Amino acid sequence: MIMERKRTDCPALPPGWKKEEVIRKSGLSAGKSDVYYYSPTGKKFRSKPQLSRYLGNSVDLGCFDFRTGKMMPSKIQKNKQRLRSDNLSLSKGKPDLNTALPIRQTASIFKQPVTKVVNHPNNKVKTDLQRASEQPRQLFWEKRLKGLRSSDVSEEALRTMDLPKGLQSIGPDSSDETLLSAIASALHMSSAPITGQTSTAAEKNPAIWLNTSQPLCKAFTVTDDDIREQELKVHQARRSLEEALMADSLARAAESTRDPEGRAA
């Protein structure tokens, strides 16, 4: 490729700086030119940012035109006018004539519409505090409780409860122990009624159709006999607790009537 080089002094820069214009004489880019600048020490600069970093604050290149090598004050004036007009249009609240709803740019492969809010004092963004506080649930998270046993103050494991025959667990590697943990967690963490997995599809593929708000058990029905049986158990437990408290109270009373040597008063 044949090129013509013209190197001249650059009065806009400090003394000793040269401007070089390389004009292409042949090829597809014939007629086009490239501009370079050389420092007094011979260092070559190919762009205005390189020149600005090298000169620093010694020379103000705000109105310097890299192509012509001259200071262009009108260039700064035009930039100031454009900036002033942009700020004025923003302060006046330039109307947005585009009525199409914006699309949320997320990693989802489906485009999700979002609410479009314009700059107006009467517009308010409504938020659902209940939905915002909800956290996603992990499938079969109750299985993390597997192997954990409750114990008393003496660190002896308590006897495991016997579940009714109508309660059947669901899910991979299901057991009565996992089902008991799931039901206890559901009763403790939610005030909603416990119905089990009402969808029959959950029995075929629980990883897809599982309702995470319900424990890992099949749907069940509580009959009147079940309620009466539970009431009887509660009554017996309260009777046993009453007898234990009464025996403890009598033992304390008898202990207080004895003298320091252990004899009855």
Image (spheres, rainbow, N blue to C red):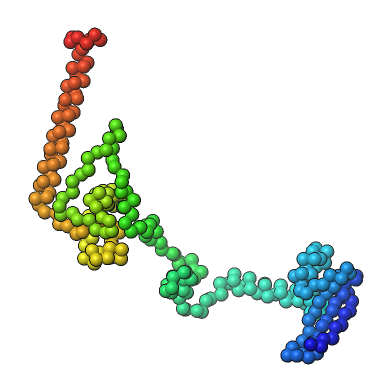
Task: Report the label total.
Answer: 0
Q: Which residue is painted at 15% across and 33% down in the image? A: 240
In this rendering, would 90 be left or right of 203? Answer: right
Residue furthest front as drawn? 173
Q: Which residue is painted at 45% across and 76% down in the image? A: 101
Quadrant where the C terminus is found in the figure: top left
In this rendering, would 152 be left or right of 225? Answer: right
Q: Is residue 180 above or below residue 72?
A: above
Q: Is residue 50 above or below residue 237?
A: below
Asked whether the viewer can see residue 62, the reply is no
Q: Is residue 169 above or below residue 97?
A: above
Q: Is residue 197 above or below residue 82?
A: above
User: Which is nearer the eye, 43 or 50?
Assistant: 43
Q: Which residue is painted at 25% across and 49% down in the image? A: 177
In this rendering, would 177 be left or right of 24? Answer: left
Image location (x, y in percent) of residue 59 = 82, 67
User: Which is nearer the eye, 166 or 87?
Assistant: 166
Image location (x, y in percent) of residue 209 = 28, 65
Residue 39, picture quadrant = bottom right
Quadrant where the N terminus is found in the figure: bottom right
In this rendering, would 256 be left or right of 122? Answer: left
Asked whether the viewer can see residue 87, the reply is yes
Image location (x, y in percent) of residue 245 = 18, 28
User: Which is nearer the eye, 240 or 210?
Assistant: 210
User: Which is nearer the eye, 197 or 249?
Assistant: 197
Image location (x, y in percent) of residue 130 = 36, 57
Q: Which residue is painted at 83% across and 74% down in the image? A: 37
